[in-house]
Image: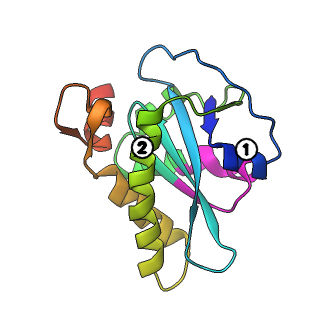
Amino acid sequence: MIIRATTKLLNIARIVPVKNLSSFDGPLPGEWYASLVTTGRKGGSAIHFVHNPTMLSVVILGRSLNKALEVFPSRVAALLRRYGFEELVDKFEFSSPIEIYTTNNRSILANMNQMKFSIEWEFAMAEEVEPAVLNRIENHMIKDLIGGKIAKGQDYIQPLERLRELL
Protein backbone atom coordinates (compact mmCIF):
# COMPACT_ATOMS: atom_id res chain seq x y z
CA MET A 1 0.00 0.00 0.00
CA ILE A 2 1.50 3.31 -1.08
CA ILE A 3 0.86 6.39 1.04
CA ARG A 4 1.93 9.79 -0.29
CA ALA A 5 1.90 12.29 2.57
CA THR A 6 2.43 16.03 2.63
CA THR A 7 5.66 17.33 4.10
CA LYS A 8 3.88 18.72 7.15
CA LEU A 9 2.33 15.34 7.93
CA LEU A 10 5.67 13.58 7.45
CA ASN A 11 7.37 16.06 9.79
CA ILE A 12 4.74 15.53 12.50
CA ALA A 13 5.21 11.75 12.19
CA ARG A 14 9.00 12.20 12.22
CA ILE A 15 9.29 10.28 8.97
CA VAL A 16 12.16 11.24 6.69
CA PRO A 17 10.69 12.37 3.35
CA VAL A 18 11.48 9.95 0.54
CA LYS A 19 10.72 10.70 -3.10
CA ASN A 20 9.38 8.02 -5.39
CA LEU A 21 8.46 9.28 -8.84
CA SER A 22 7.25 5.94 -10.19
CA SER A 23 3.61 5.58 -11.13
CA PHE A 24 1.24 2.73 -10.35
CA ASP A 25 -0.30 0.23 -12.75
CA GLY A 26 -4.09 0.02 -13.02
CA PRO A 27 -6.77 1.60 -10.88
CA LEU A 28 -6.32 -0.73 -7.89
CA PRO A 29 -4.60 -0.87 -5.48
CA GLY A 30 -3.62 2.67 -6.50
CA GLU A 31 -2.06 5.03 -3.98
CA TRP A 32 -3.36 7.12 -1.10
CA TYR A 33 -2.56 10.80 -0.57
CA ALA A 34 -2.67 12.11 3.00
CA SER A 35 -2.84 15.63 4.40
CA LEU A 36 -3.75 17.35 7.65
CA VAL A 37 -7.04 19.23 8.16
CA THR A 38 -8.21 21.15 11.21
CA THR A 39 -11.39 20.32 13.08
CA GLY A 40 -11.92 23.88 14.26
CA ARG A 41 -11.47 22.77 17.86
CA LYS A 42 -8.51 23.66 20.03
CA GLY A 43 -5.74 21.18 19.31
CA GLY A 44 -8.01 19.19 17.02
CA SER A 45 -6.79 17.82 13.75
CA ALA A 46 -7.67 15.04 11.38
CA ILE A 47 -5.91 13.28 8.55
CA HIS A 48 -7.62 13.30 5.17
CA PHE A 49 -6.78 10.39 2.86
CA VAL A 50 -7.66 10.48 -0.86
CA HIS A 51 -7.28 7.50 -3.17
CA ASN A 52 -5.79 8.06 -6.60
CA PRO A 53 -7.44 7.34 -9.09
CA THR A 54 -10.91 6.85 -7.54
CA MET A 55 -10.74 10.03 -5.39
CA LEU A 56 -12.34 8.15 -2.47
CA SER A 57 -11.94 10.20 0.74
CA VAL A 58 -11.45 8.90 4.27
CA VAL A 59 -11.04 11.09 7.37
CA ILE A 60 -9.40 9.90 10.60
CA LEU A 61 -9.14 11.99 13.76
CA GLY A 62 -5.67 12.76 15.10
CA ARG A 63 -2.34 14.14 13.93
CA SER A 64 -0.30 10.94 13.98
CA LEU A 65 0.06 9.28 10.61
CA ASN A 66 1.34 6.09 12.25
CA LYS A 67 -1.73 5.78 14.51
CA ALA A 68 -4.07 6.70 11.66
CA LEU A 69 -2.63 3.93 9.49
CA GLU A 70 -3.61 1.38 12.15
CA VAL A 71 -7.35 2.15 11.76
CA PHE A 72 -7.21 3.27 8.12
CA PRO A 73 -8.01 -0.12 6.49
CA SER A 74 -11.08 -0.65 8.67
CA ARG A 75 -12.40 2.90 7.92
CA VAL A 76 -12.02 2.37 4.17
CA ALA A 77 -13.63 -1.07 4.36
CA ALA A 78 -16.57 0.36 6.34
CA LEU A 79 -17.06 3.14 3.76
CA LEU A 80 -16.98 0.69 0.86
CA ARG A 81 -19.47 -1.59 2.63
CA ARG A 82 -21.85 1.32 3.29
CA TYR A 83 -22.11 1.83 -0.46
CA GLY A 84 -22.21 -1.83 -1.51
CA PHE A 85 -18.62 -2.19 -2.74
CA GLU A 86 -17.60 -4.96 -0.36
CA GLU A 87 -15.99 -6.99 -3.18
CA LEU A 88 -13.51 -4.13 -3.80
CA VAL A 89 -12.07 -4.21 -0.26
CA ASP A 90 -9.54 -6.97 -1.02
CA LYS A 91 -8.46 -5.27 -4.26
CA PHE A 92 -7.14 -2.28 -2.28
CA GLU A 93 -4.51 -4.67 -0.79
CA PHE A 94 -4.49 -3.25 2.74
CA SER A 95 -2.50 -6.24 3.97
CA SER A 96 0.48 -5.34 1.76
CA PRO A 97 3.47 -3.56 3.34
CA ILE A 98 3.01 0.19 3.79
CA GLU A 99 5.35 2.40 1.79
CA ILE A 100 5.33 6.10 2.69
CA TYR A 101 6.58 8.73 0.23
CA THR A 102 6.25 12.44 -0.42
CA THR A 103 3.48 13.67 -2.68
CA ASN A 104 4.24 13.85 -6.39
CA ASN A 105 1.02 14.94 -8.10
CA ARG A 106 0.04 18.60 -7.93
CA SER A 107 -3.30 17.86 -9.54
CA ILE A 108 -4.30 15.55 -6.69
CA LEU A 109 -3.03 18.06 -4.12
CA ALA A 110 -5.09 20.83 -5.74
CA ASN A 111 -8.23 18.70 -5.48
CA MET A 112 -7.37 17.83 -1.87
CA ASN A 113 -7.10 21.53 -1.03
CA GLN A 114 -10.60 22.07 -2.46
CA MET A 115 -11.89 19.11 -0.45
CA LYS A 116 -10.17 20.50 2.66
CA PHE A 117 -12.49 23.52 2.65
CA SER A 118 -15.57 21.26 2.58
CA ILE A 119 -14.22 19.02 5.32
CA GLU A 120 -13.29 21.92 7.59
CA TRP A 121 -16.73 23.47 7.03
CA GLU A 122 -18.41 20.18 8.00
CA PHE A 123 -16.31 20.08 11.18
CA ALA A 124 -17.21 23.70 11.96
CA MET A 125 -20.95 22.99 11.58
CA ALA A 126 -20.82 19.93 13.87
CA GLU A 127 -21.60 20.50 17.53
CA GLU A 128 -18.95 18.01 18.54
CA VAL A 129 -16.47 15.88 16.65
CA GLU A 130 -17.54 12.23 16.81
CA PRO A 131 -17.48 9.18 14.50
CA ALA A 132 -20.90 10.09 13.06
CA VAL A 133 -19.44 13.38 11.81
CA LEU A 134 -16.61 11.51 10.09
CA ASN A 135 -19.14 9.22 8.39
CA ARG A 136 -21.18 12.22 7.26
CA ILE A 137 -18.07 13.87 5.78
CA GLU A 138 -17.10 10.68 3.94
CA ASN A 139 -20.66 10.24 2.67
CA HIS A 140 -20.61 13.80 1.35
CA MET A 141 -17.18 13.45 -0.29
CA ILE A 142 -18.03 10.20 -2.10
CA LYS A 143 -20.82 12.04 -3.95
CA ASP A 144 -18.88 15.26 -4.55
CA LEU A 145 -18.10 16.40 -8.11
CA ILE A 146 -14.42 16.50 -9.03
CA GLY A 147 -13.09 18.12 -12.19
CA GLY A 148 -9.80 18.94 -13.87
CA LYS A 149 -7.16 16.47 -14.98
CA ILE A 150 -8.55 13.85 -12.60
CA ALA A 151 -11.75 13.60 -14.68
CA LYS A 152 -9.69 12.48 -17.72
CA GLY A 153 -11.65 13.99 -20.57
CA GLN A 154 -14.98 14.35 -18.77
CA ASP A 155 -16.18 17.58 -17.25
CA TYR A 156 -16.68 16.08 -13.81
CA ILE A 157 -16.58 12.73 -12.06
CA GLN A 158 -17.79 11.40 -8.73
CA PRO A 159 -15.83 8.90 -6.64
CA LEU A 160 -19.03 6.81 -6.52
CA GLU A 161 -19.00 6.57 -10.35
CA ARG A 162 -15.33 5.58 -10.37
CA LEU A 163 -16.00 2.77 -7.90
CA ARG A 164 -18.94 1.49 -10.00
CA GLU A 165 -16.62 1.32 -13.02
CA LEU A 166 -14.31 -1.00 -11.06
CA LEU A 167 -17.01 -3.59 -10.33
Q: Quadrant of residue 60?
A: bottom right
Q: Secondary structure at mark 1?
A: helix
Residue 110 or residue 27, whichever sits in front: 110
Is residue 91 rendered magenta in the image? no
**Vertical placement of 101 versus 81: above or below?**
above
Which residue in the structure is indicated by mark 2? 110
Task: Look at the image and tell me whether residue 167 can be seen.
Answer: no
Give the Cα separation between the discs numbered 2 and 1.
Answer: 19 Å
Give the magenta part as a residue range: 59-75
* Count of numbered marks: 2
Q: Is residue 167 above or below residue 133?
A: above
* Magenta-colored segment: predominant secondary structure: helix
Expressed as whole percent of the image width and height from the top left, the position of residue 72 reads 62, 47
Quarter of the image holding residue 117? Answer: bottom left
Q: Quick check: is 67 in the magenta stretch?
A: yes
Q: Quadrant of the N terminus?
A: top right
Identified by mark 1, the residue type is Leu
Kindly identify which residue carries mark 1: 10
Left or right, 4 with reference to 156: right
